[in-house]
Image: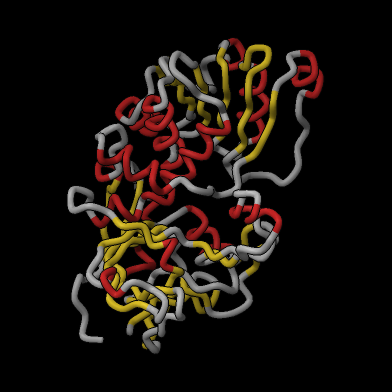
Amino acid sequence: MAASVLSGPKEIRLEERRVPTPASDEVLIRVTAVGVCGSDAHYYREGRIGDHVVTGPLVLGHEAAGIVVAVGADVDPGRVGQRVSIEPQRPDPTSAQSRAGRYNLCPAMEFFATPPIDGALAEYVVIQSVFAHSVPDEISDEAAALFEPLSVGIASVQKARISPGSSVLIAGAGPVGLVTAQVARAFGATEVIVSDIDESRRANASTFGATRVVDPAVEDTRALDVDAFIDASGAPRAVVDGIHAVRPAGTVVLVGMGASDYPLPISVIQNRELIVTGVFRYANTWPIARELVLAGLVDLDAMVTARFDLAHVEDALNADRTPGSIKAVVTLPKETNA
């Protein structure tokens, strides 16, 4: 099979690799679509994200969908031919976090495209069958691949305790901010304010769920009065300003990855009894993602602004630098010669 491999800093190479064989609890999936995430671009440009460092050849891509073409010995053979969205993780089911239902926090997690685990920018991948979620024909391959960033939005809104009538401020109108705004509306938020310094991104937010957009360089976001703040920017200034915007007993959810350490307004957090928490991936979100998309409450297809094939992954990784870009997707043929 063909696989797109990060072989060095800013060096992507198309290689021939052996088609993987599914273990007893796995399925073999012919990949049809892979979304490009900001983390993929970071590994490509910087070779690391925090403590995760690329030390050898790595296949990028963790937002993926495809078709089951073979199954392991313990998997129902009736799954062959099924269209699926891939939840790109393999936790240890015996760990304390997994047994508590927080398998995303499993210390032994193997996650697609996190060194040294290869990702989905290849013609075939294997995944445990329980993490290959079936999707109906009404959902496109591209939308099925984007269940992954949608799941980040779902986890964020759940942590923010959004319910009917809630108000929320979301900092950052990139792909995660846009899906989070849509999920917040779907969960009943009546005021969804999105802040971003980029005018085109604010325009995108107005299309994807925001009831109001603000330019934090012009408007004082600290003066806002909301039930919850979700940071999808990773910008320290946005986080601090967003905390000031939350009313007493509200919730702050940190999603964006930026600086490792920076000062927080502790007196505001204490005096208002704010809950401050983070989001690290997701758990048990794929069924919710499927229903939100089926119900038309979240539009993932409209977020795709560029498409590339497996031979042009490098272009896909640089698509985020194109004005107006939201989400680049690498598409693969539904049939291969493997």
In the image: residue 148, left or right of residue 307: right
Question: Which percent across, then down, holds residue 102?
Answer: 61, 49
Above or below residue 73? Residue 280 is above
Q: Which residue corresponds to the image point at 34% horizontal and 56% vertical from the top-left?
A: 145
Whether residue 214 is visible to the viewer of this picture, yes or no, is no
Give the vertical position of 268 relative to 101 (above or below): above
Q: Nearer the viewer, residue 259 or 33?
A: 33
At 54% from the left and 58% from the top, the residue drawn is 42
Question: Residue 290's image quarter?
Answer: top left
Where in the figure is residue 31, as x and y percent of width and height?
31, 69
Give me the residue at 53% from left, 79% from top. 57
Residue 286: x and y in percent read 41, 49
Front-lying residue, 47 or 63: 63
Q: Is residue 18 left or right of residue 307?
A: right
Q: Is residue 124 above or below residue 148?
A: below
Q: For the C terminus, give its image quadrant.
A: bottom left
Image height of 314 relative to 124, above or below: above
Residue 117 point in image, percent of width and height:
55, 72
